[in-house]
Amino acid sequence: MAVEVLMPKQGNSVESCIILDWKKNEGDAVSVGDVLCEAETDKSTIEVESTAAGTILKLLYAVGEEAPVQTPIAIVGEPGETYEQSATAAESVPEKITTPIIETAPSTPVSSEQTRTTSETAVSPRARSTAEKSGIDASVLPGSGAKGRVIERDVLSVLASRPPVSPAAMDALRTKNVSVPVSGSGIGGRVVLSDLNKPTAETVPSAHEIPVKSVRKVIAKRMRESLATTAQLTMNIYADATALRQLRTKLKESNPALGLQQITINDLILFAVSRTLVAFPYMNSHFLGDKIVEFEHVNLGFAVDTAKGLLVPVIKGADMLSLAQISKSCKALAAAAIDGKSSLEDLSGGTFTVTNLGSSGIDTFTPILNAPEVGILGVGGISLRPVERKDGSVAFVEHIGLSLTIDHQSVDGAPGARFLKALAEHIASIDVLLSL
């Protein structure tokens, strides 16, 4: 009896995974525990194992497609066995996939048949026929059909908006890669053959298309959802960085045997944030719509720029760790993220997030919340700012820019400002904070 293999659930926050590479093809024998495919979430890359033994009868998703968790991705049974796809599986499979296209290794060229199948299945037969007769490339049109499918009305809409075309020009459109200008030189603006060879102001400049997929696709979705589901307010402040700089210098010059030379400005900021959050539990919380969950300890996330996109490893129990422990944990988690070796545990469970753009020359910015967290701190660079002394004189003192974004559904502006002010004071007296 045919069995459906499901995309496994990956924590509470992961709703779907993107198929990166199929390790098995239709018709291949498979055993329980064999790796069927590699998939990617917004957090990490995973291997999906088969939960059934037999022959792969059907792969339900193509490489690059997004498969919801707990829905079928493959069907396994006896060779030649017929099967009936469940309603859940049928609804989850994108309409454009009629034949699974397995992405080949870089050394193996993709066949023209595979390319043809992928492009044609996104266009209805009637739309394709009408487009071919009219010299229109239907594959580049935005589709208004189910799941973005290009249908005949999409082609007719293009025809209605373009000028009349002479028979000779129409033949050229069908056989050459040329576009129709906004107006022609013929009678009544009719496009003639010579118009197709003339450069016009409407000529589209050459461009390189980059498909939005993998981690970038998931990041885009989560950032959009964050802005759509939260009431985000950002406030900025500058903290005196004199003590921060002095302490960093002392640590760098300390005895190597102490293991403190590699502690960075960012490590010191993470330490200050972890201690400040303890006194402001409303900032160390999740907003869940009908309730707010405040956490006793701080699981501190920090943004890491990787080749695949932005990842946020989490330092668990940061408020209970020493400065040296935070620094060591931060470096290990960041290295794993950059190398693509982060586990789901590494990237989940955060209660507050810090993102640092100071090394890029940014002073203040607007960080986007990592929902359901209610706060995220943006750390900028250190720069000189004028400060009036008690005697009326003005001195230029190093300050570090801090940008706090809060979810106004959970935290009002005044409480958020009190947290940010307290953090700035802790950073300004970081040497004192370390002694507490």
Image (cartoon, rainbow, N blue to C red):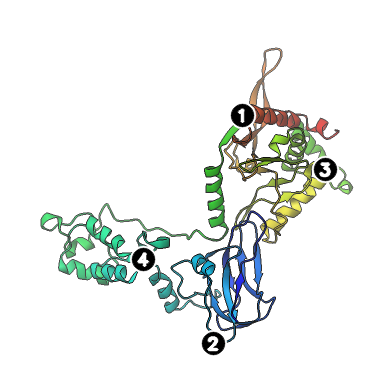
Q: Which residue is mark 1?
A: 413
Q: Are marks 3 and 4 in contact (CB under 8 Å)?
A: no
Q: Gap in Å between the C-alphas at discs 3 and 4?
A: 56 Å
Query: What's the mark number on residue 139?
Result: 4
Q: Which residue is mark 3?
A: 320
Q: Which dot, 4 or 2, sits closer to the camera?
A: 2
| Farthest residue, direction top | 391
Label 4 sits on a secondary structure element that is helix
Foreground pick, 373 / 389: 373
Quadrant of the image containing the C terminus: top right
Q: Residue at the spot x=68%, y=31% of the render?
A: 420
Position of residue 188 measured from the top left corner of the image (x, y, whole percent): 12, 55
Q: Residue at the spot x=28%, y=53% of the render?
A: 202
First reached walking from the N terminus: tag 1 or tag 4? 4
First reached walking from the N terminus: tag 3 or tag 2? 2
Label 2 sits on a secondary structure element that is loop
Q: Which dot, 1 or 3, sits closer to the camera?
A: 1
Quadrant of the image containing the N terminus: bottom right
Q: Residue at the spot x=82%, y=30% of the render?
A: 432
- Give the residue type at disc 2: Gly
Q: Gap in Å between the C-alphas at discs 1 and 3?
A: 28 Å
Query: What's the mark number on residue 80?
Result: 2
